[in-house]
Amino acid sequence: MSDTVTSKPDVHDMVVVHRTFRQSCAELPDLVRGLRPGDSARAALVVDAVRFLLMGLEAHHTSEDEYLWPLLTARTGVRAEAVARMEEQHHRLEELVTDVRGALDALAADPRPLLAEQVADQLTELRSVLTAHMDEEENTILPLAAECLSVAEWEELGEISLAKLDRKHLLRAFSALMAVATPEEQRTLLTKAPAPARLLWSLSGRRSHARREAGLRAGNGG
């Protein structure tokens, strides 16, 4: 293990990933509450955004569960208690994701006020728990990962997470990252991305993301 960590990985890319979750969690409860009874077309659009968030969270968290936590637990000694807290928080988040997902088919079919309010409340709770989790992860876990993991190991975590997404969602996920990234962060993301991803984002991803976001906000007076 003497050569396991030859240089420190740039773990800031996870902060950008978290930023996409923070933005979606901040906006989606109001979008759900704004649904009008009978407007199934609008409901389908909002529900699609919720599903995309949940899918991203699931891929992100299961990758950490399967790969990152075991690595860190084996290498951090007494600080492994911080990793154990992450695992416990993931269990709670999984419960909340399951609750939200269970109501989405009904919401898309009939966005009645009581159901919309229920889902919005669930998303609000999800946001609260997830925000606290991401705050702790960024303050505690990312420094540990930078200290204990190699560049190759950190990059493998990203590859595992991407592999859990359906290929049809990869451009959407990359475009969401680019939309919340600073210019410097965008340059870093583009450097790491495969050439086809860079080309597709330039040709269509940027515009598709902008149209999708504009459509979401238009129905709520955004």
Image: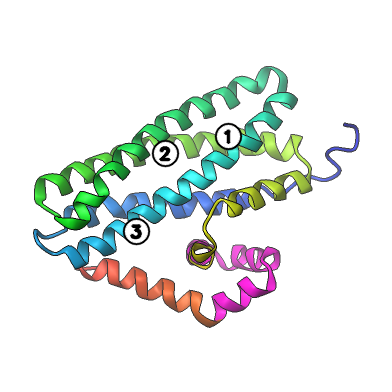
Q: In this view, does 67 lie to the left or right of 57?
A: right
Q: Residue at x 74, y 36 (%)?
A: 147
Mark 3 / mark 1, whichever is N-terminal = 3
Amino acid bearing label 1: Asp
Q: Is residue 220 visible from the viewing direction of this image?
A: no
Task: Please give the label number shown on residue 49.
Answer: 3
- Disc 3 is placed on an element classified as helix
Amino acid bearing label 3: Ala
Q: In which quarter of the image is the C terminus?
A: bottom left
Q: Is residue 179 visible from the viewing direction of this image?
A: yes
184 in magenta: yes
Farthest residue in the top direction?
Answer: 78
Mark 2 vs mark 3, CA separation in Å: 17 Å
Task: Please give the label number shown on residue 65.
Answer: 1
Q: Residue at x 68, y 68 (%)?
A: 194
Which residue is at the front of the view, 141 or 40?
40
Q: What stretch is highlighted in magenta?
A: 173-202
- Residue 170 in percent (x, y) is at 54, 63
